[in-house]
Amino acid sequence: MTSRTRQLRIEDVKRHIKLSGLKTRDMVRWANLNLIDWLNQAKSASVRRVLDIIVSAQQAQRIAEDARRVATDEQYFSCKVRAGSVLSKLNAALSRYNCMVKVLFYDASLRRHYFFFTGRDSKDRREVVAVAFLIENLALVHRVRRCVECQRWFFAVTEHQKYCGDNCRKRHAAQGADFRAQRRLYMRDYRQQQKAAETRAKKLVKRGT
Ligand SMILES: [Zn+2]
C-alpha cells in the first residue's frame, strides 16, 4: 500500500469517528461489543455469513481506494467494473437482512438509527447487530483484522496494527528471534560441511595427479 493511500485511509477513519461522536477508544469498545467478541466465539453459519460480508466489503474498499489514484478515465472505469462485481456479491449477502430507520432523541439531539432484522428467529440477534455495525461503519471495515499470531479477530486502533495485543506482538517477535538463532546455527554447520567437502575434493584431486 502506498503511503498516500494509507494517509487517505487514516483521514477517512478520523472523519468517520468524529462524525460518529465517539472517541477512538470508545469506537474500539463499540466494535468489540457489537462485532469482534461474537466473531471470536465458536464458528457457526451466521458467523461465516458475516465473515463473507467483511471479506467482500474489504475488497470493495480496496478497489475504491485504487480508483482514487488512477490517471485515466479508462482506469477509473475498470475500477468501477471490478467494484461492481464485488458489490453485487456483497449486496446479495445483505439481501438477507431488512433495515428500518428511526429518529431518536439522544444526548439532547436528534439521531437517526438503523435497525436491522432478518424476520427470522431471535437467535439471529448477534448476527444483525454485527451486520448493522459493519454497514454503519463501512469506512472502518479494513480495521477488522485477524491477529497474525493467535488468529483471533480484533479491531485495529492504528493503521499498521497486526497483533491483537502486546502479548501476541512479543510472542511473535520472540519466535522471530528463535528462528534467526536456529538459522545462524544451521548456516554455521552448513559452511563447515561445505569446507570439509571442498578439502576432501582437493585431496582426491591431488591423489589423482
Ligand atoms: Zn493475538
Image: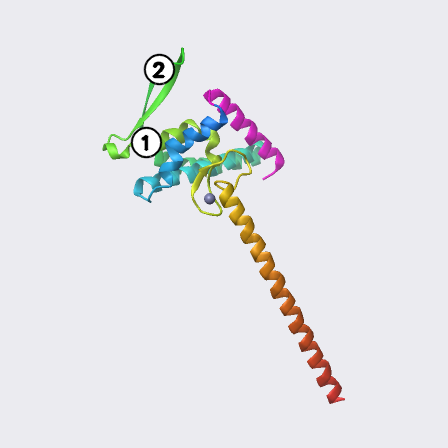
Q: Is residue 194 above or below residue 13?
A: below
In reply to whether residue 12 is colored magenta, the answer given is yes
**Residue 181: percent from the left, percent from the top?**
60, 59
Q: Disc 2, disc 1: CB below 8 Å?
A: no
Q: Is residue 45 above or below residue 108?
A: below
The residue range painted magenta reads 1-22
Q: Which mark is on residue 128?
A: 1
The answer to whether residue 193 is visible is: yes
Mark 1: give few (<14), some (14-19) or many (20+) Cα within 10 Å: many
Q: Identify the main secondary structure in magenta.
A: helix
Colouring rule applied to residues: rainbow
Q: Which residue is drawn at 37% across and 29% down?
A: 132
The residue under the point 48% across, 29% down is 139
User: Which residue is nearer to you in this view: 142 or 176?
Assistant: 176
Camera-side residue of 58 and 157: 157
The numbered dot on residue 103 is 2
As rendered, which of 189 and 108 lies closer to the eye?
189
The quadrant where residue 91 appears: top left
Is residue 70 visible from the viewing direction of this image? no
